[in-house]
Amino acid sequence: MNKNIVMFVVLSALTIFLYYFFVPQPKPQPRQQQQSAQAQPDEQTVKAQELKPADKAILKNNLQIEEETINIETPLYRAAFTNKGAGLISWEIKERSGKWVELILPESAPFMANFPGSVYKIVSKSNEKIVFEHVSEQGWKVTKTYTLSQNSYMHNLTMKLEKIRGEASLPQLELELGPGLGTDLKESKENISLTRAIAFTSAKPGKLVKLKKESEPASLFRWAAIDNRYFLAALIPERSIDFEQIIPSRLDKKHPFSVTMTALVPKDGISKEYSVDFYLGPKGYTYLRSYKLGLERAVDFGFFGFLGKIAFAVLTYLHKITNNYGWAIILLTTIIQILVLPLTLKSFKAAAAMKRIQPMIKEIQDKYKDQPQRLQAEMLNVYKSQKVNPLGGCLPMLLQLPIFWAFFTMLRNAYELRNEPWILWVKDLSAPDQFMQLGNFNLNLLPLIMGIGMFFQQRMTAATSDPTQRRIMYIMPIVFVFMFWSFPSGLVLYWLTNSVISMIEQYFVIKKDTAAHVKHA
């Protein structure tokens, strides 16, 4: 190979290496920043191009604008807006306890920003309305107007996009919520796993859709949102056909979801106005239902949701009578026990009968332990002669499971129970009761009381003489104590009340069954 060619290749490679090593390279920009930076003309070109005098002044002011924060405070919330992207960097809501909960995580800010690298001019600001304006060097202008409610969590954002130079190409506007949504400290550990990207379909009767990774046509949905156990951030377009896609995204399973709504670029290429209501607040079922937008569907009542809604309606009614959710839970649990009493009694009677015939079963097992077929036949004869169904105690309990599971899920997710006390040391029915703190250990008394109650209940109904099975029965209360240890005290109160009522019912059933057979003996 020619020596000059070799030298040329070596020097060229060295030059490229030195260039990339010593000359700083531009960092990748978010999509909206890329749109804002497309076709950047130099200063000479901008001055030479035709702009209206008013827009020339705005553009000149844009270049001199400094970043600024606007703070808003009402009895319901505290908000902080930034003129960098004209979005939200903080949104705290005040709960009944008087504590403030931050819904915008630091890594998620700013919410609902457009072209985050651009600094907007603040046209006007007040507690009710904030107007931002940005004129790009490409020759278009965007005006964002936040209209804020002082006594609700529902607000409005209007975005006006317009061309101010003939050859300008209008960009696509985007609104993003997340990634993630804030909560308070006691729910922070589970928050990432509970944060969802969701949307509600426009077609009646409306369906809640959990968004995963695929984008969805925005025109098919009434709203899109992110939520966690107790809070919701939702975008509700006035006209969903003004938007193109709803895009859920997350880095991986260790990170929470975000949801982005992209606007359609104006067909005429001249101007377009978009109006979007946005909700940032608690997931109180009754409160969300008052908007008649299907937002209450974000409250998770579980697989047996229709039963959970009925239980919630009754719980709310009982709260109006008692003015205490703890007593309302006890009353509702009692009502449920009365409703399922026929099934419960049948189950307890079967358990009592099984306990009564255990000596007979034990005798047969010892006598025919080496004759499986004979053993089975003799046991069937005992069941038949004593009119006992060995499965009679299971089926009634299985039929009750949907009711208990619906009630369980409802109490687990009801925002209305947050910061609501019962009595004495139970100050928050949505959190563990924390009777006292021993160093770093929280002693929760309600699960212990519940476990003791379950232990005595197992002793009352233990229908087996097998030592291994008896040990398993006695271990169950310990397992339940550990399982319920970190559960909200409202759930533990429900299970404790259920156990106490069951023990009372069992006592009378066993007493009656024993007396009846002594009489006929």
Image: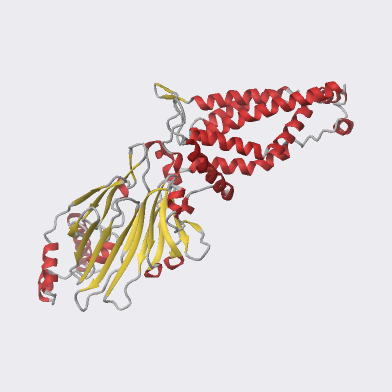
Q: Quadrant of the N terminus?
A: bottom left
Left-right relation of 60 to 289: left
Q: Nearer the viewer, residue 357 or 493?
A: 493
Pinpoint residue 7: horizontal percent, then vertical percent.
20, 64
Residue at 12% x, 73% y is 45
Please name the colour scheme applied to the rendered image.
Answer: secondary structure
Q: Residue 277, percent across and down?
A: 35, 60
Residue 300 in the image: state x and y as whole percent.
Answer: 50, 48
Q: Quadrant of residue 496?
A: top right
**Above-or-below relation of 406 to 171:** above
Tally the marks: 0
Q: Nearer the viewer, residue 372 or 140?
A: 140
From the image, which quarter does the C terminus lie in? top right
Q: Along the line of sight, which residue is nearer the eye, 503 or 172?
A: 503
The answer to whether residue 231 of the structure is visible from this angle is: yes
88 vs 4, left or right, is right
Quick one: 264 or 370, which is closer to the camera?
264
Question: Which residue does the image show at 37% across and 65% down from the upper left?
Answer: 238
Residue 469 visible in image: no
Residue 481 percent across, percent down from the top left? 55, 28
Residue 478 falls in image quadrant: top right
